Each structure stands twice: as structure tokens, then as C-alpha cells.
Image (tube, rainbow, N blue to C red):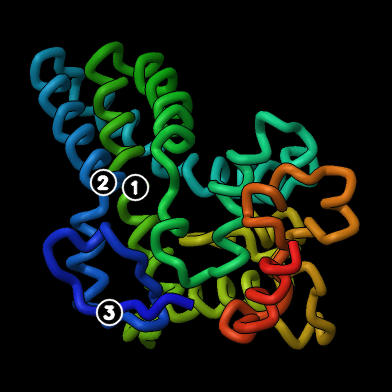
Amino acid sequence: MKQVSSSAKPGIWKRSHYLDRMTLKDLWIAYFQYPAIIAYIGLAIASIVTWFAYPASLLQTVAAAGVVVVLYPLVWYCLHRWVLHSNWMFKVPFLASTWKRIHYDHHQDPNHLEVLFGALHTTLPTIAGVSIPVGYAIGGIGGAAAALAAGLITTCVYEFVHCIQHLAYKPKSKVIAEMKKRHMAHHFHDENGNYGITSYLWDRVLGTFYDRPERPKKSPTVFNLGYTEEVAVRYPWVKTLSGGIVATGHPRKRGDTQNADREAA
């Protein structure tokens, strides 16, 4: 594996970064240089400017933003459980690359920072599709602008918390530490549960919340989401895009075995 420096400098995104090798300071610097985060912040500012041009009432503005913030955990839960952890996207040739980018690669190596951030071509339509209609129904153009700004800012918060959960750092906040515990179980023990990131309310409501002692056996598909060598025989597109291999085991323990598999392929 290519050696990666953890120091954050200008042009940081010209090389790969791994959260288990970064400090909190490195993360802060990298976070605000990442193109998707810059795009979210820029669009949030543009939405606020739009609100000033077409203002909604205070009540409409608060309601539009509030509804989006409340909806966000439910929307994320549904997408995470029934889309990102689906077993149908990799079966469709033109969706295989999207599934690989938006979630398979993240589970293959949960600490790889570039693939932890959502891809703009998938996140922006989702944010806009959820927030703008709700905001417009509440307060017209101004309400839509307020809702979109709330959705973008909430996404920025979500992305940073998600980064913290994978960083080699013990959060001082007990709340965030508990979030990290649940998310680490999702990535390194059993992917079939703990789908929330900043809230596990819907995991509790829908029966997917768990503590590791409740599931003593580790999931064999925690790093490949069920996309195994056997599955790849019939649906080869993700394997082809992954250099001809389906990685198994902990990402930091693959080493020469995966290189040998790639050479054999």
C-alpha cells in the first residue's frame, strides 16, 4: 500500500488520506479543503442570499428549516439501509459504479477519507429533492431557500461527525463517543444494523439498533456488503472496477494477499 503522509498542506487532495493516520487538526484542515464541503458551504450561502431576495416570514423560515433537520435522520436511515446496503444496485451494470463509489468502497476501507465523503452527483439531488419541495410548500421561494440551506448545513455537520467516527481520536463528548461506538460496530462487526450516524432513533424504532454483545458472531460480509467472489461471477462489474479483486478481511491486514490476487487476476 502506498505510504501516505498525515500532514495537511495546500493541494491536500492530490493524494490519498486515511483517518486512522490523521490528527484532529489534520482533519479540520482537510475537511474545509474538500471540494464537496466547499460546494455545500457555497450553495448554503447562495440559498441564504436567495432568502434575502425572496424572504419568507420568520415562522415559515423556522418551520421550513426545522422540518428538514427533523427529516434528515429518517431520510438517511432509509437511504443507508435500503439503498446503500441494498443487494440490487450492483446487479445493474449502469448502477454498479455508483454503488461502488457511494458505499462499497467506504466499507472496503472505512478509514479512506476520500470515499467517506458523499459524491456530489448523488448527495446534491437528494438534499434538494427532500428540502426544496418541503420548504416551498411552507413558505414559497424563501421557504425553499431556507430549507435547502438547512439541508446543506446539516449535511456538513453530518459529514464532519462521520469523519470523527473514523478518526483515530477519542471524542471528549459522551454523545459523540456513543455515536462512534455504534458506527464502529456497523463497520467492523456487523453491517446489518446501527444505520444512523448522528441519530439512532430510527434504528431503535425499526429494530436495527444493537450492542456488540448482542451479536457475538462477526458478520462475514462486514467489509464487502455481500458482494462476494461467488456473487461477482454473475455480477462482475464492481469487481472489474475494483481492479479484478473482491477484498476480504480487515483493510489493514490484507497487504500482500490482495496484491497477489490482483496479479493473478
- Camera-nearest residue between 109 and 27: 109
Quote the CA–CA distance across marks 3 and 1. Answer: 27 Å
Whether residue 196 is situated above or below residue 46 in the rendered picture: below
Badge 3 vs badge 1, beta-carbon distance below 8 Å: no
- Camera-nearest residue between 42 and 58: 42
Mark 1 = which residue?
Answer: 154
Mark 2 = which residue?
Answer: 35
Q: Is residue 115 left or right of residue 219?
A: left
Element at label 3: loop
**Residue type indicated by callout 2:** Pro
| Circle nearer the N terminus (3, 1) | 3
Element at label 2: helix
**Residue type indicated by callout 1:** Thr
Residue 21: % across, % down:
36, 83
Q: Quadrant of the C terminus?
A: bottom right
- Residue plotted at (40% across, 73% down): 18
Quote the CA–CA distance across marks 2 and 3. Answer: 19 Å
Whether residue 128 is situated above or below residue 35 in the rendered picture: above
